[in-house]
Amino acid sequence: MAVPTQSNLVAVGILEKDTFADVSWAWIFPQFPEEIRDAIVHFSGIAEENATFAERKDIFGHVGDTWYYASVTASSLPEVPVLLSAVLAKDFNPQMYNDLNTLFLELYSAEGSGPAVQQAFVSVFVKGSLGKRFNVASYDVRRAHLKGSIKELVKTFGIESILLFVAVLLRRRVAVYCPDQAQLLATVRALPLFVYSRRDWNIVRPLVRLTESDLRDTAAPSVAGYLDGDVEQRTDLWDVLVNVPAGTITVSPQAEEDFALGKVHKEIAQYLVSAAADDSINDQAIVTELVTRTEDLLSGLRSLGTADESGRVTVAAETIKGRKMPASMQRFLCNLAAAENMLA
């Protein structure tokens, strides 16, 4: 099992909303950057006047090299009807950190103050566990990765799903628009599955506003989630736009040449659509097949290259362009070589 061997915790914070609807950070250990505190308040919705959170809400985001996970729920504390726990960490694992937030909320609610939360945080930070109540070794990171559904993506976008495969493979900028926050989070976390062999969820920026500070993190490669539909007009921010409610995918004019498709793309697209419609094929089988097909592409690319003394293979663009193949495939392979740091 691919389980964490140690805690990647960075910090914990408790946010209270009182009976006057005032929101304040009641306790933080050791510290939260201001931009992350602001993002948590904004995206959790805790400051909204009539938000009571009778149903718990969990969110996750990624700022710089830090992931944040926040859980907000109704509280039993006197004069504090709403309570939020947030943790900062260095890795992607929503379920694990949601469970840890549950523990921190229970501890804080029992006393209405932070010492018990601090003790628990230090225990998890140092030992990776808190007695029998929590243990990072119980959380297989592969489950966090495979929690997203590539099958649902293909069902939503059909044959155009091949554009998502190409965008992630070539490390392009993908912007995902969806006004439903839960659906947005489910979509962005699934996109790296198209190239699961990289196991790179750090490209995901789940919740992004159209502000200068947020947009700093959306350079390629990135999968950025937006609740604001105005992102559709900002073609300077994306190579591919995914409009979830409309079920459409748009390639920006400046990136169109890089998304010219050939025979290999047609075959992958046909497989995706067929597999998504087959109840006997699950998400993991689709991911495994894409890993195989990606490796076939890379093996073919490596066969055109030369290895140096360390074994690193590089491919010259001239070599690719000298092969008898359509110009669109030559361009694709050159882009793939660049994405894999193989272009000489």
Image: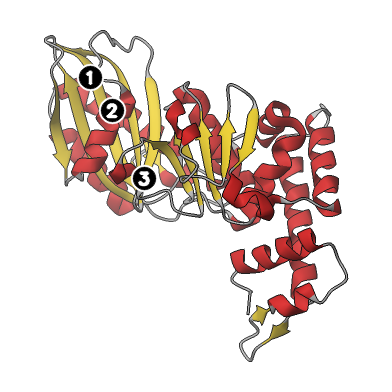
Q: Earlier in the sequence, mark 2 or mark 1?
A: 2
Q: Are marks 3 and 2 in contact (CB under 8 Å)?
A: no
> Callout 3: 10 Å neighbours few (<14), some, many (20+)?
some
**Residue under the image location 38 percent in, 38 percent down:** 61
Return the x and y of residue 281 as percentages of the image width and height. 80, 34
For the residues labelled 2 and 1, say whether their Cβ atoms are less than 8 Å apart. yes
Give x and y (percent) for residue 233.
Answer: 48, 34
Viewer can see residue 133: no
The 10 Å Cα crowd at callout 2, few under 14, some 14 to 19, many 20 or more, is few
Frontmost residue, 321 versus 27: 321
Residue identified by numbered label 1: 47
Asked which quadrant contains residue 102, the reply is: top left
Alpha carbons under labels 2 and 1: distance apart = 7 Å
Rendered position, 128 above or below 339? above
Q: Which residue is mark 3?
A: 215
Considering every residue shown, the one lying at the far front of the view is 253
Residue at 33% across / 28% down in the picture?
43
Give whichever of discs 3 and 1 has the lower sequence position.
Answer: 1
> Which structural element holds mark 2?
helix
For disc 2, the marked residue is 42
The residue furthest bottom is: 309
Secondary structure found at label 1: loop
Instruction: Where is residue 48? Give x, y as percent.
Output: 25, 15
Mark 3–mark 2 Cα distance, whole angstroms, equals 16 Å
Amino acid at pointer 3: Leu
Between discs 3 and 2, the one toward the N terminus = 2
The three-letter code of the residue at mark 1 reads Ala
- Nearest to viewer (mark 3 / mark 2): 3
Q: Is residue 72 visible?
A: yes
Q: Is residue 119 left or right of residue 90?
A: left
Q: Amino acid at mark 2?
A: His
Q: Quadrant of residue 98?
A: top left
